[in-house]
Image (spheres, coloured by chain):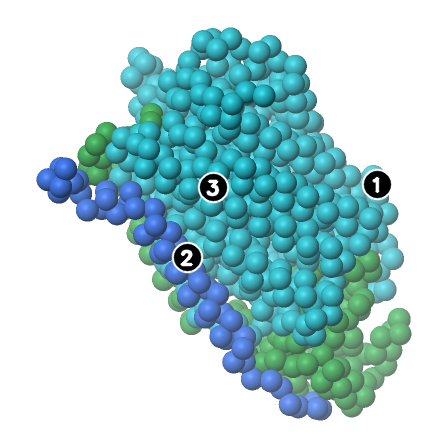
Amino acid sequence: MSNELDVRTCPITGKKVFKNAQNLIWINAVTAVVFILIGGIMAFTVAMTRWPAVHLLSADMFYRFLTAHGFNMLIFWIVFFEIAGLYFGSAVLLNSRLAAPRLAWFAYILMLVGAIIVDIMIFTGKATVMFTSYVPLKADPLYYVGVILFAVGALIGCAIFFGTLAVAKAEKTYEGSVPLVTFGLSAAAIIAVWTLACGAIIYIPTFLWSIGLIQNLDAAMYRLIFWGLGHASQQINVTAMVSVWYLLATLTVGAKPVNEKICRSAFVLYILFINLAPEHHLLTDPTLSPWHKMVNTSYMMYLAVLASMIHALAIPMTAEVAQRKKGYTKGMFEWLTKAPWNEPGFPAMIFSLILFGFIGGITGVTYGTEQLSIKSHNTWALTGHYHGTVVGGTTLAFMGLTYYVIPLIFRRNLIGKKWATAQVYIYAIGITLLTIGMGGAGTLGSPRRHWDVTFADAIIPFSFDPTVILFTTIAAIGGLIAVTGGAIYVGVSVLSVFFGRKLAPNEAKLL
Amino acid sequence: MSIMSPEKYWWKPADLQEKIWITIAMLWCLVLTIMMFGWHFFGTQNPSIEPLKITPENYRTVSEAFIAKYKVGEEAGIPIVAPPDGADVYLRAQMWNWTPILKLKKGVNYKFHISSVDLMHGFSLMPIVMNFQIVPGHDNILNMTPTSTGTFHILCNEFCGIGHHTMIGKIIVI
Amino acid sequence: MAEEKDKISAWQLMFDDISLLFLLGMVIPTVLYLLWGVMEYANAPIATITGP
Ligand code: HEM
Ligand SMILES: [Cu+2]
Ligand SMILES: [Cu+2]
């Protein structure tokens, strides 16, 4: 086996890449893709069950698979990919070795074992509790063990990120400040530590409760602390996604941040205030005071929203400036029309930005007010909201990035660039329809996590306005398209990683 | 390049365009904040939060007493209850029904106490789509005045086990 | 070295100091969201009524 401290110089970026970091990025990213595959199959079955025309699964299987879909996608796919991203952002971007690679492998194994335990519990029907597992709904104690193992592993991953920052600083592998992408990922890692701490605070007592050592857990308090994990992890996703946007802008059009101060200040606003956001899950909860609700849901006067608004300007701006420097200066929009739309990275970035901002972001900020939360809480519109943010936004950005990581870090030639590019468009169209369908049906009251919106065996007869079924159908068709896009993603990336031509050490080929 | 360290002194003033955008965004955030508080204090459609915990056992006792006192009939095995004007109304969420069916009067204010005796449930009033989280151990107190007559249904929109999708309740407003 | 540092804006130095940002990132949500919320739930009155 080659020495763990082997170094190569990246022929494209000139960065030093250490073997130990490279291997860990590889394993975490590949594992992430395995989980998006599982989650994607679940997505298909769940979407087909919600569609009354097909109604694929039995109720038991539906709730089981829905739990699996949420967990495998939202937690396993995203977090494994983020850990790979953290190692990339620290070790590779700072020309450094990874601090404590052994520990990083240990963290990986903890996460993997945790994930496998959770999946076994869910698929054997011992943990049909949705990924939220609200008490007093009880899962098998092993389920909580799996969640805790996974969270501890992820927490160690964050520690290794910070350790690598310290190593790089001590060994002077870079000069001055860290690159913007690394800075953004540091913000994500800080948010992650708080998130995972909330996870520990809530899952350890819940585990003790499941084995009978604790008698009473306050269900409302569970929700408060759980969302410190459940929602704050979405803020990790937002922050990591924005960092990936900057990264994609650089990789696709060679963009350079127009003003580092502005971009970094926006990330600092995230660090300070974005973790107040879990509150918007609690707006229709009893007991909690309006003051707590208003101060927190507004992220302290919407300062985290301000940060997103700043990124929303800064990212297209960096791309525009870079394009204009290349000579695309005709009129207002030549820089945009002459952008590399036929490569996966650029459309992935733009669609991710649009889906996140216009579908996910706008619904998020509006639903996060007391009155509109009453209208949308637990309806399918909510599911539509985060299929805009984390599914359209984060996942699409990560998909786009994968196609660059394959040649850059894994040194394999991408197989099927055309497919990769088409995938981005297909997936984006699918998610757009999916979110419109979910949003429409939800606005008319269609509940989330619901096996049968025709209420065939309800105790008191009830049926929806047919428009609900129409929107549900749109969602299902969008879901099919999105699943197709997701399948192409898995296909292209798996084929390339394992069977792509190995790039020569000095081959500066990106796509 | 956002993957390279920035120049040595990067703390530089923003451009005019950036300043304009950030100022507009900040003003908008300020408007949103003022609206959020304004709507709460001056709007008329807010959850009327009165903090109150209630054990599931106690809640069951109270709601049973409520049903026994004002029961006027039964449908699908669920009692129909017609409380007097302005009464405290107890609506119990349980696996998998909303007990009782309520008969209310248009234009009369009722103080709802909604809680659960087992798992979490989701109160979703159709067709006007108003949703509240119903948490065992806590009394979700809501002051509501029906403003139109007719039959309203209550769905459950929080997962509460295998029968979740069958859980439907009813409010009749006369 | 010390002179050079002087020319760098204090803000820039602060932003380069991850541990400071880390600390603030932990304290603000812990106090405003978690502790405040837990206190409210813990201090809420418990109903003693037994009838309508
Ligand atoms: C590939 C296309 C996808 C489709 C067609 C799809 C479809 C669906 C559907 C139909 C539901 C069920 C909603 C309900 O009954 O309440 C759902 C729930 C959910 N999805 Fe997806 N999804 C996709 C991708 C993703 C991805 C990539 C993520 C995360 C990164 C994700 C996260 C979730 C979560 C967290 C839930 C909620 C589960 C719950 O309520 O407990 N989905 N999705
Ligand atoms: Cu229910
Ligand atoms: Cu339910």
In percent of width and height, residue B142 lies at 60, 75
Q: Which mark is residue C26?
A: 2
Output the chain of dot 2.
Answer: C
Is disc 2 on the same chain as disc 1?
Answer: no
Q: Which mark is residue A56?
A: 1
How crowded pointer 1 is (Cα within 10 Å; few <14, some 14-19, many 20+) is rated as some
Q: Find numbered disc 1 in the image and state the secondary structure of the residue it sits on.
A: loop
**Please, is residue B112 above or below residue A388 in the view?**
below
Left of A148 or right of it: where is A85? left
Q: Amino acid at mark 3?
A: Ile
Q: Amino acid at mark 1?
A: Leu
Q: Which mark is residue A439?
A: none
Check disc 3 and report the residue beneath it: A160
Note whether residue A337 is visible.
Answer: no
- Residue B96, horizontal then vertical, whole percent: 81, 66
Q: Residue at x 32, y 52 (%)?
A: C20
Q: Tell me which chain appears green.
A: B
| Nearest-to-viewer mark from 3 and 2 | 3
For the colour cyan, the matching chain is: A
> Can residue A491 be seen here?
yes
Q: How far apart, in angstroms, are the residues tagged by discs 1 and 3? A: 44 Å
Asked whether the residues under the numbered discs 3 and 2 touch, taking CB atoms below 8 Å apart as contact, a structural biologist would say: no
- Which secondary structure lies at badge 2? helix
Amino acid type, callout 2: Met
Name the residue at the left extreme.
Answer: C3
Mark 3 belongs to chain: A
Q: Quarter of the image containing the N terminus of chain A?
A: top right
Q: Nearer the viewer, mark 1 or mark 3?
A: 3
Q: Which chain is blue?
A: C
